[in-house]
Image (tube, rainbow, N blue to C red):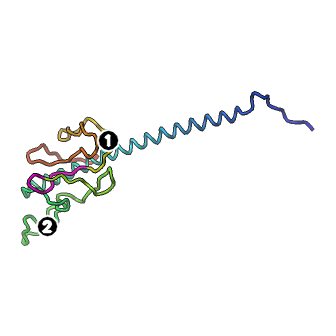
Amino acid sequence: MPRGRRTPAGARGFTYLGMLALLVLIGLLLGTAGEVASRTAQREREAQLLWVGHEYRTAIGRYWARRRAYPQALEDLLGTTPLGGVTDAPVPVRYLRQLYPDPMTNAADWVLVPAPGGGIMGVASRSQRAPLKTGNFDPDDQAFALATSYGDWQFLFQPGMFRRRATVP
């Protein structure tokens, strides 16, 4: 009965080392792919935060332009009461479709920026993560370039400031 060929003593374990090196390479590639996916998701949340923040700023601006006062709560922007509380003209004015959650925390836990005379003049995120975006902001968001966290991105409405209609990203 013939026996199989024997491998030389120096060639033993070569395939094992080759497979081990291949597994390490695959692990490194998967780690890099995970990092890219994480950064892409964070950039998408940043874009959503900018859009939602502009929506809140615009809604507060429309509220102020119509009533000459800041809203006392974010729910006031939903506009379920008629202008001035007049009951014979029940035309509710909606300044915002819904209360949007903070894209960075996935909760409706906004930091409310108080207005000098009372009310809310803006919102900011509660997230303390460092932003990826550090430039190319809209003219009304130029201060965001110096921010160290998303909480520093304050979407404020001040009468007389440059306002624009936010667009969907």
Q: Which residues are magenta?
A: 115-124
Instruction: Report the residue at 36% width, 44% height from top.
Output: 42
Q: Quadrant of residue 138?
A: top left
Q: Which kind of residue does numbered mark 1 sit on?
A: Ala
Give yes or no for residue 152 being in the magenta stretch: no
Q: Which mark is residue 130?
A: 1
Q: Nearer the viewer, residue 59 or 70?
A: 70
Q: Which residue is mark 2?
A: 81
Q: Mark 1 or mark 2: which is in front? A: 1
Q: Which kind of residue does numbered mark 2 sit on?
A: Thr
Q: Mark 1 packing: few (<14 Cα in 10 Å), some, or many (20+)?
A: few
What secondary structure is found at the residue carrying circle 2?
Answer: loop
Q: Do labels 1 and 2 touch, CB within 8 Å?
A: no
Q: Quadrant of residue 16?
A: top right
The image shows residue 45 at horizontal and vertical percentages of 33, 47
The image shows residue 36 at horizontal and vertical percentages of 43, 39
The image shows residue 164 at horizontal and vertical percentages of 16, 45
Q: Residue furthest bottom?
A: 88
| Vertical order, 91 against 33 (above or below) | below
Q: From the viewer's perspective, is 103 left or right of 74?
A: right
What secondary structure is found at the residue carrying circle 1?
Answer: loop
Q: Which mark is residue 47?
A: none
Question: In whole angstroms, how far apart are the C-alphas of marks 1 and 2?
Answer: 39 Å
Q: Mark 2 packing: few (<14 Cα in 10 Å), some, or many (20+)?
A: some
